[in-house]
Amino acid sequence: MQTVLIIIFVLVYAAIALEHPLKVNKSATALMGAGLLWTVYALGGVDPGILDAQLGSSLMGTAQIVFFLMGAMTIVEVVDAHNGFEVITSRIKTTKLSSLMWMVGFVSFFLSSILDNLTTTIVMVSLMKKLLEQREDRLFFAGIIVIAANAGGAWTPIGDVTTTMLWIGGQITAIEIMKGLFVPSMINLLVPLAVTSRVLGDRPVIAPRRSMDQIPFETSAFERNLMFFLGLGVLVMVPVFKTVTHLPPFMGILFGLGLIWLVGDLLHKKEVDLRKQRLTLVRALTRIDMSSVVFFIGILLSVAVLEHTHVLSGIAQWLDITVGRQDTIVIIIGLVSAVVDNVPLVAASMGMYNLQQYPPDSFLWEFIAYCAGTGGSILIIGSAAGVAAMGLEKIDFIWYMRKISGLALMGYFGGAMYYIIEHQLFP
């Protein structure tokens, strides 16, 4: 039975990685894979009582991640509906491309750590269309934004889906992941920025022609500021909520979502229905990327089968015997995440190693968070941020590989080497 399960999972994994050439949505593949794997497992003679318990346990773990993601994505949509991100983007003004590159890199890095890498990439790439006329410049900036957003998402528990998974799973804690990965993640960003700023030199920013509809008028400055800082505050307070109450993070995000919903309804209660509908949380719920949410459900349930059948623990033992060095194994996992989605990779890693052998905040879990989070920048298809940028600016896979992959690879190894050396010196 294990052989059949592995074959099905490999085929599902290949279909997910080849989503664009096959033109089959990865969410459909993940759901079908989950259904097939659990069906084969159920028909393999497992005791129905054990099957129910395992499925219930897997469903509980998956639901916690999905509820958290849906809450966070909805909050971001509410802020965006109020043009809240203008609070940041309207302050980016410079005349040199190299200076703009540094500003965009740092804004993307820190914004991603609070929101997430996907949302940050969408916001910042869209902003570049307002600031840069030359398409080649916009493409180059989009590549740096992908690197910065993935680096920024790796060092906080809410900045990337993979770190959120590790945080909810108990492999990392909020304070320790921020302390342990901030500097490596920053190095991951600084190395590409240092190289690109020298390449750009003193080239000027060529701004596009202004249009009358460039500035949105739907919301007032008060509304933008209120919803931006309220949304930001809720997201930042979720780790604090978990630490104080010991409740799972999804309870904190749902509580905050209810607060934002209440404030939004009170804020717009006297307005006409048409404008009110565009700004309320009800509309934001319809705008979240449910396809991605469904993909997470499918892939997490698929990986759960391999965990329950001890396939993942067997792979971990094989890697330990074949490769030996734990840091090398994790670096390989990060490089593989450039080719395939990092969500199933991290989910598999969580099943390969247990918390008894590797306790929370140990070298393994923190290094997986860094490598899986930043390794996806090496290729345009390696992360949700990269795929979003590819769609927004129609970035060619080969162009990205020639212009950006080398920069991302330098940053990846720079941060990884720093973390390894730091851990050896200060275990």
Image (cartoon, rainbow, N blue to C red):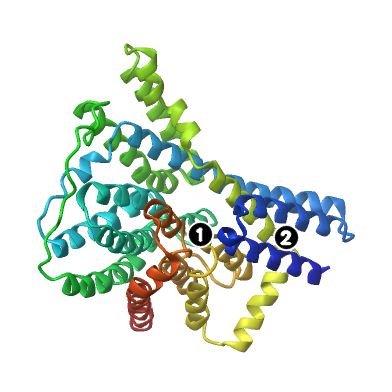
Q: Residues within 10 Å of mark 1 (few under 14, many from 20)?
A: many
Q: Amino acid at mark 2?
A: Val
Q: Which residue is more in the foreground, 350 or 390? A: 390
Q: Earlier in the sequence, mark 1 or mark 2?
A: 1
Q: Please identify the quarter of the rendering in which residue 244 is found.
A: top left
Residue 154 position, x and y percent, is 39, 62
Locate the C terminus by quadrant. Answer: bottom left
Residue at 62% across, 88% down? 322
Taking the spot 26% from the left edge, 74% from the top edge, the residue there is 191
Q: Quadrant of residue 262?
A: top left
Q: Residue at x 35, y 14 (%)?
A: 269
Q: To which quarter of the image does residue 226 belong?
A: top left
Establish if 24 lies above or below 423.
above
Q: Nearer the viewer, residue 254 or 105?
A: 105
Q: Which mark is residue 77?
A: none
Query: Would residue 405 appear left or right of 384 to someone viewing this image?
Result: left
Work out whether residue 166 or residue 414 is closer to the camera in this orientation and state it.
414
* Label 2 neighbour load within 10 Å: few <14, some 14-19, many 20+: many
In this view, 190 is above or below 15: below
Whole-percent x and y of residue 248?
51, 46
Q: State the image coordinates of residue 403 (x, y, percent, origin top left).
A: 33, 72
Above or below: residue 426 compared with residue 290: below
Q: Is residue 180 left or right of residue 333?
A: left
**Residue 415 visible here:** yes
Q: Name the residue carrying label 1.
A: 166
